[in-house]
Amino acid sequence: RALSADGLGAIGWSEGADALRRRLALLHRELGAPWPEVSEAALLARLDDWLAPEVDALARGAAARGIDLAEPLRRLLPWPEASRLAELAPERLEVPSGSRVRIEYPPVEDVAATDSTGGPGALPIVAVKLQECFGWAETPRLADGRVPVLFHLLSPAGRPLAVTADLASFWSGPYAQVRAEMRGRYPKHPWPEDPWTAVATAKTKRRLAGE
Protein backbone atom coordinates (compact mmCIF):
# COMPACT_ATOMS: atom_id res chain seq x y z
CA ARG A 1 0.00 0.00 0.00
CA ALA A 2 2.84 2.37 0.80
CA LEU A 3 4.45 1.78 -2.59
CA SER A 4 1.12 2.31 -4.32
CA ALA A 5 0.58 5.57 -2.48
CA ASP A 6 4.08 7.04 -2.41
CA GLY A 7 5.98 5.13 -5.10
CA LEU A 8 9.57 4.12 -4.51
CA GLY A 9 10.02 7.30 -2.51
CA ALA A 10 8.53 5.31 0.36
CA ILE A 11 11.85 3.47 0.45
CA GLY A 12 14.14 6.13 -0.99
CA TRP A 13 17.19 5.95 -3.23
CA SER A 14 20.61 5.66 -1.67
CA GLU A 15 23.50 7.37 -3.43
CA GLY A 16 24.69 4.04 -4.82
CA ALA A 17 21.24 2.96 -5.96
CA ASP A 18 20.57 6.31 -7.65
CA ALA A 19 23.93 6.18 -9.45
CA LEU A 20 23.26 2.67 -10.77
CA ARG A 21 19.77 3.64 -11.86
CA ARG A 22 21.10 6.63 -13.81
CA ARG A 23 23.65 4.44 -15.61
CA LEU A 24 20.97 1.91 -16.54
CA ALA A 25 18.64 4.66 -17.76
CA LEU A 26 21.31 5.92 -20.17
CA LEU A 27 21.96 2.43 -21.52
CA HIS A 28 18.26 1.76 -21.98
CA ARG A 29 17.87 5.01 -23.92
CA GLU A 30 20.86 4.37 -26.16
CA LEU A 31 20.91 0.59 -26.55
CA GLY A 32 17.35 -0.45 -25.72
CA ALA A 33 16.57 -4.03 -24.79
CA PRO A 34 17.72 -6.00 -22.94
CA TRP A 35 18.86 -3.06 -20.80
CA PRO A 36 15.83 -2.43 -18.57
CA GLU A 37 13.69 0.66 -18.35
CA VAL A 38 14.09 2.11 -14.87
CA SER A 39 11.51 4.88 -14.76
CA GLU A 40 9.35 4.97 -11.65
CA ALA A 41 6.36 3.58 -13.53
CA ALA A 42 8.36 0.77 -15.14
CA LEU A 43 9.93 -0.29 -11.84
CA LEU A 44 6.61 -0.28 -10.00
CA ALA A 45 5.10 -2.41 -12.76
CA ARG A 46 7.84 -5.03 -12.28
CA LEU A 47 8.11 -5.24 -8.51
CA ASP A 48 7.99 -9.05 -8.54
CA ASP A 49 11.00 -9.16 -10.88
CA TRP A 50 13.37 -7.21 -8.69
CA LEU A 51 11.93 -6.22 -5.31
CA ALA A 52 9.88 -9.25 -4.21
CA PRO A 53 12.03 -10.22 -1.17
CA GLU A 54 12.06 -6.64 0.09
CA VAL A 55 8.31 -6.22 -0.43
CA ASP A 56 7.76 -9.40 1.60
CA ALA A 57 9.98 -7.98 4.33
CA LEU A 58 7.97 -4.76 4.34
CA ALA A 59 4.77 -6.75 4.63
CA ARG A 60 6.23 -8.44 7.73
CA GLY A 61 6.94 -5.06 9.29
CA ALA A 62 10.48 -4.24 8.16
CA ALA A 63 11.36 -0.54 8.06
CA ALA A 64 11.24 0.91 4.56
CA ARG A 65 14.26 3.14 5.20
CA GLY A 66 16.34 0.09 6.08
CA ILE A 67 16.24 -1.12 2.46
CA ASP A 68 18.97 -0.17 -0.01
CA LEU A 69 17.60 -0.42 -3.56
CA ALA A 70 21.05 -0.88 -5.13
CA GLU A 71 21.22 -4.66 -4.80
CA PRO A 72 17.57 -5.27 -5.76
CA LEU A 73 18.09 -3.10 -8.84
CA ARG A 74 20.97 -5.34 -9.90
CA ARG A 75 18.46 -8.17 -10.27
CA LEU A 76 17.26 -6.42 -13.43
CA LEU A 77 20.69 -6.50 -15.07
CA PRO A 78 20.52 -8.53 -18.29
CA TRP A 79 22.92 -11.45 -18.65
CA PRO A 80 25.37 -11.85 -20.27
CA GLU A 81 25.20 -8.17 -21.29
CA ALA A 82 25.61 -7.11 -17.64
CA SER A 83 29.28 -8.05 -17.81
CA ARG A 84 29.77 -4.94 -19.99
CA LEU A 85 28.17 -2.46 -17.57
CA ALA A 86 31.51 -1.04 -16.41
CA GLU A 87 32.65 -0.71 -20.03
CA LEU A 88 29.49 0.88 -21.43
CA ALA A 89 28.66 3.12 -18.48
CA PRO A 90 31.67 3.26 -16.14
CA GLU A 91 31.49 4.88 -12.71
CA ARG A 92 34.75 6.78 -13.25
CA LEU A 93 36.81 8.05 -16.17
CA GLU A 94 40.60 8.07 -16.21
CA VAL A 95 41.90 11.42 -17.47
CA PRO A 96 45.41 12.07 -18.93
CA SER A 97 46.83 13.10 -15.54
CA GLY A 98 46.07 9.62 -14.24
CA SER A 99 43.22 10.71 -11.97
CA ARG A 100 40.05 8.63 -12.03
CA VAL A 101 37.20 11.12 -11.96
CA ARG A 102 33.63 10.28 -11.07
CA ILE A 103 31.12 10.48 -13.93
CA GLU A 104 27.85 12.20 -13.05
CA TYR A 105 25.08 10.64 -15.11
CA PRO A 106 21.96 12.68 -15.85
CA PRO A 107 18.85 12.17 -13.71
CA VAL A 108 16.53 9.41 -14.89
CA GLU A 109 13.79 11.92 -15.68
CA ASP A 110 16.14 13.93 -17.94
CA VAL A 111 17.31 10.79 -19.73
CA ALA A 112 13.75 9.68 -20.39
CA ALA A 113 12.80 13.08 -21.81
CA THR A 114 15.72 13.49 -24.23
CA ASP A 115 18.16 11.66 -26.45
CA SER A 116 21.94 12.01 -26.56
CA THR A 117 21.61 15.05 -28.85
CA GLY A 118 18.94 16.72 -26.75
CA GLY A 119 21.21 19.14 -24.94
CA PRO A 120 23.69 19.20 -22.05
CA GLY A 121 21.10 17.86 -19.60
CA ALA A 122 21.11 14.56 -21.46
CA LEU A 123 24.87 13.98 -21.23
CA PRO A 124 27.06 12.42 -18.56
CA ILE A 125 29.35 14.98 -16.92
CA VAL A 126 32.96 14.87 -15.79
CA ALA A 127 34.11 17.84 -13.69
CA VAL A 128 37.93 17.97 -13.68
CA LYS A 129 40.70 20.56 -13.47
CA LEU A 130 41.63 21.87 -16.89
CA GLN A 131 45.32 21.07 -16.46
CA GLU A 132 44.55 17.38 -16.00
CA CYS A 133 43.29 17.15 -19.58
CA PHE A 134 46.17 18.73 -21.54
CA GLY A 135 46.80 16.93 -24.81
CA TRP A 136 43.47 15.11 -24.85
CA ALA A 137 42.14 15.46 -28.37
CA GLU A 138 39.37 12.90 -28.64
CA THR A 139 36.38 13.39 -26.36
CA PRO A 140 35.51 10.07 -24.67
CA ARG A 141 32.19 8.52 -25.62
CA LEU A 142 30.09 6.06 -23.62
CA ALA A 143 27.45 3.46 -24.50
CA ASP A 144 29.38 1.94 -27.39
CA GLY A 145 30.43 5.35 -28.68
CA ARG A 146 26.95 6.84 -28.80
CA VAL A 147 27.18 9.46 -26.06
CA PRO A 148 29.96 12.06 -25.60
CA VAL A 149 31.07 13.06 -22.15
CA LEU A 150 30.39 16.70 -21.27
CA PHE A 151 33.47 18.17 -19.59
CA HIS A 152 33.26 20.86 -16.95
CA LEU A 153 36.84 22.13 -17.02
CA LEU A 154 37.74 23.66 -13.68
CA SER A 155 40.22 26.21 -12.35
CA PRO A 156 42.82 25.14 -9.75
CA ALA A 157 40.30 26.37 -7.16
CA GLY A 158 37.60 24.09 -8.57
CA ARG A 159 35.58 26.82 -10.28
CA PRO A 160 34.14 26.21 -13.77
CA LEU A 161 36.14 27.74 -16.63
CA ALA A 162 34.56 26.04 -19.64
CA VAL A 163 31.95 23.45 -20.58
CA THR A 164 32.57 21.38 -23.68
CA ALA A 165 31.80 18.07 -25.33
CA ASP A 166 34.49 18.76 -27.95
CA LEU A 167 37.94 18.88 -26.35
CA ALA A 168 39.80 19.31 -29.64
CA SER A 169 37.83 22.44 -30.49
CA PHE A 170 38.35 23.83 -27.00
CA TRP A 171 42.15 23.49 -27.12
CA SER A 172 42.26 24.99 -30.60
CA GLY A 173 40.05 27.96 -29.77
CA PRO A 174 38.63 29.09 -26.41
CA TYR A 175 41.61 27.82 -24.39
CA ALA A 176 43.71 30.81 -25.48
CA GLN A 177 41.21 33.23 -23.91
CA VAL A 178 40.94 31.13 -20.76
CA ARG A 179 44.75 31.09 -20.49
CA ALA A 180 44.96 34.85 -20.91
CA GLU A 181 42.46 35.42 -18.10
CA MET A 182 43.64 32.75 -15.67
CA ARG A 183 47.45 32.58 -15.75
CA GLY A 184 47.75 35.80 -13.74
CA ARG A 185 45.16 34.63 -11.25
CA TYR A 186 46.73 31.20 -10.75
CA PRO A 187 50.44 31.73 -11.49
CA LYS A 188 51.54 28.64 -9.58
CA HIS A 189 49.77 26.37 -12.07
CA PRO A 190 50.77 25.64 -15.66
CA TRP A 191 49.07 27.55 -18.48
CA PRO A 192 51.17 26.60 -21.52
CA GLU A 193 50.72 28.28 -24.87
CA ASP A 194 50.56 24.85 -26.47
CA PRO A 195 48.14 22.63 -24.52
CA TRP A 196 48.61 19.78 -26.99
CA THR A 197 52.16 18.94 -25.89
CA ALA A 198 51.94 19.96 -22.22
CA VAL A 199 52.09 17.39 -19.43
CA ALA A 200 48.64 16.73 -17.99
CA THR A 201 48.86 17.24 -14.25
CA ALA A 202 47.01 18.10 -11.06
CA LYS A 203 50.23 19.55 -9.58
CA THR A 204 51.64 23.04 -9.37
CA LYS A 205 54.56 24.06 -11.60
CA ARG A 206 56.98 23.80 -8.66
CA ARG A 207 55.92 20.28 -7.72
CA LEU A 208 55.94 19.22 -11.37
CA ALA A 209 59.47 20.59 -11.84
CA GLY A 210 60.70 18.75 -8.75
CA GLU A 211 59.85 15.31 -10.12
Image (cartoon, grey):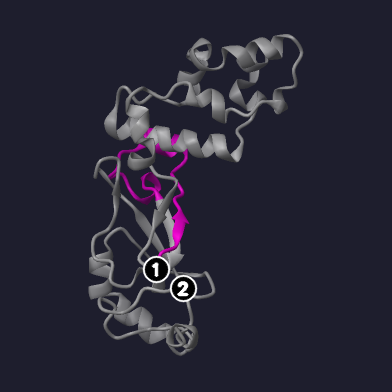
Q: Is residue 58 above or below residue 116?
A: above
Q: Determine which residue is flagged by label 2.
A: 202
Residue 91 belongs to magenta span = no
- Give the image quarter of residue 35: top left
Q: Position of residue 19 (x, y in %)?
A: 51, 40
Which quadrant, please, contains the C terminus? bottom left
Q: Is residue 185 visible?
A: no
Q: Are the residues tagged 1 and 2 within 8 Å (C-beta)? A: yes
Q: Earlier in the sequence, mark 1 or mark 2?
A: 1
Which kind of residue does numbered mark 1 sit on? Ser
Residue 21 appears left or right of 2: left
Q: Is residue 171 above or below residue 115?
A: below
Q: Position of residue 122 (x, y in %)?
A: 37, 44
- Give the image quarter of residue 68: top right
Which kind of residue does numbered mark 2 sit on? Ala
Instruction: Specify the segment rendered in magenta.
Output: 97-124
Q: Residue at x 61, y 36 (%)?
A: 14
Q: Position of residue 170 (x, y in %)?
A: 28, 69
Q: Residue 149 or 174: which is nearer the viewer?
A: 149
Q: Determine which residue is flagged by label 1.
A: 97
Q: Residue at x 42, y 38 (%)?
A: 23
Q: Element under label 1?
A: loop
- Give the image quarter of residue 196: bottom left
Q: Residue 122 or 83: which is nearer the viewer?
A: 83
